[in-house]
Amino acid sequence: MININQLKLTIFSALLGNIGENIRALAFDFTDNKIIMYGYLDQEPCDDDYESIDIAITEIMSSYSNFTNQDILLIESHEPIGTLPSHKGWVFVRKE
């Protein structure tokens, strides 16, 4: 069983230095074997956005051997952050 608070701390640590300036918010979700990151950006996501989140997820997966798969879903959104789905929780929210 995954301790969600410990997982959040691992995610926070992995994201340090890996959040691009156009990322508005990041939420996470997981299943038994998959970690999923949802990113809401203020512009169309580019390869660098995916790469930076992939680096963070690699660090997370190295700490949780049960995560054998990953999904990174980045979308452009100008909706208020409070109206966006947070899934299992926010791990980054930019002050706007």
Image (cartoon, rainbow, N blue to C red):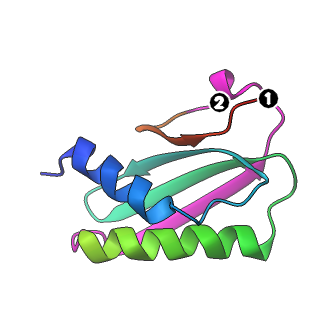
CA–CA distance in space, label 2 to label 1: 7 Å
Classed neighbour count for the residue bearing mark 2: other residues with Cα under 10 Å, few (<14), some (14–19), many (≥20): few
What residue occupies the far left of the structure in this picture?
Answer: 1
Q: How many marks?
A: 2
Residue drawn where x is 58% and y is 67% of the image? 53
Pinpoint residue 27: horizontal percent, then vertical percent.
52, 44
Pinpoint residue 17: horizontal percent, then vertical percent.
57, 65
Name the residue nearer the viewer: 30 or 22.
22
Residue drawn where x is 79% and y is 29% of the image? 79
- Tell me which amino acid carries mark 1: Glu
Q: Does residue 59 appear to the left or right of 67 in the view shown? A: right
Which residues, given as a range, are shown in magenta? 64-85
Classed neighbour count for the residue bearing mark 1: other residues with Cα under 10 Å, few (<14), some (14–19), many (≥20): few
Q: Quadrant of residue 81?
A: top right
Query: Where is mark 2, residue-wise?
Result: 84
Position of 63 relative to 90 (above/below): below
Name the residue nearer the viewer: 54 or 22.
22
Position of 86 relative to 5 (above/below): above
- Tell me which amino acid carries mark 2: Leu
Pinpoint residue 23: horizontal percent, then vertical percent.
72, 51
Where residue 67 is drawn, which disc sits there?
Answer: none
Query: Where is mark 1, residue-wise?
Result: 79
Which SS class for mark 2?
A: loop
Which SS class for mark 1?
A: loop
Q: Does residue 12 appear to the left or right of 39 in the view shown? A: left
Residue drawn where x is 45% and y is 69% of the image? 57
Q: Is residue 92 magenta?
A: no
Position of 64 relative to 37 (above/below): below
Q: Are marks 2 and 1 in contact (CB under 8 Å)?
A: yes
Residue drawn where x is 64% and y is 51% of the image? 39
Q: Earlier in the sequence, mark 2 or mark 1?
A: 1
